[in-house]
Image (cartoon, coloured by chain):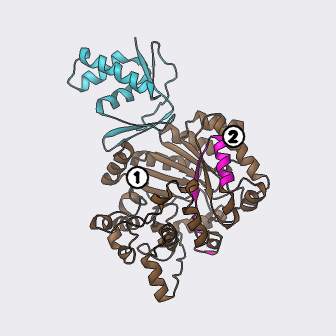
Chain colours: A cyan, B brown
Amino acid sequence: MTYVARTTEIAARMVGGEMMIMSARDSTLFSLNEVAATIWKAADGVTPLRDIIENVVCAEYDVTLDRALPEAEKLVTDLAEHGILIVSAEPIPHPATSRDAV
Amino acid sequence: MSLMQEMGARALKLGIPLSVQIDVTYRCNERCIHCYLDHEDHGEMTTAEIKDALNQLADAGVFFVVFSGGEVFMRRDFFEILEHARSLLFDVKVKTNAFMIGEREADRLRELGIGSVQVSVYSHKPEVHDEITKLPNSLNRTVAGIRLLRERGVRVVIANVLMRQNLNDYAGVKAIAQELGAEYTIDPTITPMMDGDRGIISLGLRREDLGDVFRNSELVGNVEEFCTPPPPVDGEVLDELPCSAGHTAAYISPYADVFPCVQFPLPSGNLRKQKFIDIWKYSPQLNEVRTITARDLPVCSTCSHVGSCTRCPGLAYMEGNMRGPSQLDCEKSFARTGIKTANMALRKSNNAAPDLVQIQFLPSTAELAAASRA
């Protein structure tokens, strides 16, 4: 099972309908599209990625779990490499941001 | 176009205030000879007021918040303010003299994921730096604070304000930055006091010194490129906006006054009376600032430097007219290129210097200050 959590080391805001995220580690700026932003927002450290995709992404967008999950796994790996998400095989006990600030 | 530029362009198009500087206090432990502030407390925002302001800024779409002062660590609640700002996911930068940064403060700044800390260093010589700050041992304490931050991997930018007192010390300051792994930037601008008094302008570099600075590759990089004569003026240049002040940027004083920029003291509203978003959208002052393109500048639109000048509308405002030239920037354009500006030619023919405006605080602030004193 894969769990994902937002890190503390980022700045983020919706700017004109796009989620802009900056890594505090290296000031790299990222732009997430709507689906990626939905996954990022739902990354609370305790909900398995599979559940996020099935219950949030597949429920909101016209996509099947079989197609969306591999793409989501690649996305979270990429974001983890830039310090934007934490990816773990275990639940992440202290998810970073508790409020819906963006 | 980089992603950052794209974000800026989108914010400009949609009227989003991408960047806001908040001065949390004007109090300071230093008394820098070139400082433009009144260091008395005339009724600073409370912790709750600043947190509320931050909530409003997040709702308005602000991405970058700069906390400055005065000295930010004069506020005992500064870390509480920082924690709140980071919980709202702002990119946070802090300007401080680092005098009060010890192990605990450096640890906390690292833990909070502060984007960068900007620290002013005036000289590598204690006798010069401390004579400017008027605080004994300030250079040693400032460098110690920077060292603690760098040891923890916090990004530090050393800002070297150049004036007559420290003109020859930039190489020493740059060496300190290199030794500490900090970035280095120069600023040759001395701005008038907030009350309009321009006595401190005399501390600024002379024209010939400015020319030397701008022809020093250690300070400006490629001198030929930096000092290149201005390109021919075309219609596109005249349609350009002067800067981000009031367009995607704003400034909030410790007394909750909102201005287009820290260097543009045009009172535009007060958070104790109005919501930030209402000031941002409907302030007549901000909306007037937004109407001004280079084409609307009576003198500067006729100047060959109009496309390359660093003209600051705030400095122009302090010199008497937000649509007028900024003499300080005219001097920079001339020092860079050796080509006189339209304003210089006009001033020579008129042989008259403009008076500075007296900056008027909003009535609400004056009332609150009086109430606070009572």
Per the rendering, the mark at residue B278 is none
Kind of residue at badge 1: Pro
Q: Considering the numbered disc 2 on the image, is that residue within a helix, a strand or a loop?
A: helix
Which of the 4 image quadrants contains residue B211? Answer: bottom right
Residue B189, percent across and down?
57, 64
Residue B185 falls within the magenta-colored stretch:
yes
Q: Which residue lies at the image location 60% right of the left edge and 41% below the top edge?
A: B80
Q: Chain of mark 2?
A: B
Q: Which residue is mark 2?
A: B147
Q: Is residue B358 left or right of residue B310?
A: right
Kind of residue at badge 2: Arg
Residue in front for this viewpoint, B156 or B93: B156
Q: Considering the numbered disc 1 on the image, is that residue within a helix, a strand or a loop?
A: loop
Residue B253, percent across and down?
54, 59
Is disc 2 on the same chain as disc 1? yes
Q: Relative to B4, does residue B215 appear above or below in the rendering?
A: below
- Point out the stretch of residues depicted in magenta: B171-198
What is the count of numbered marks? 2
Q: Which residue lies at the image location 37% right of the left edge and 18% below the top edge?
A: A49
Residue B90 falls within the magenta-colored stretch:
no
Q: Which residue is mark 1?
A: B17
Q: Earlier in the sequence, mark 1 or mark 2?
A: 1
Q: Which residue lies at the image location 30% right of the left edge and 53% below the top edge?
A: B13
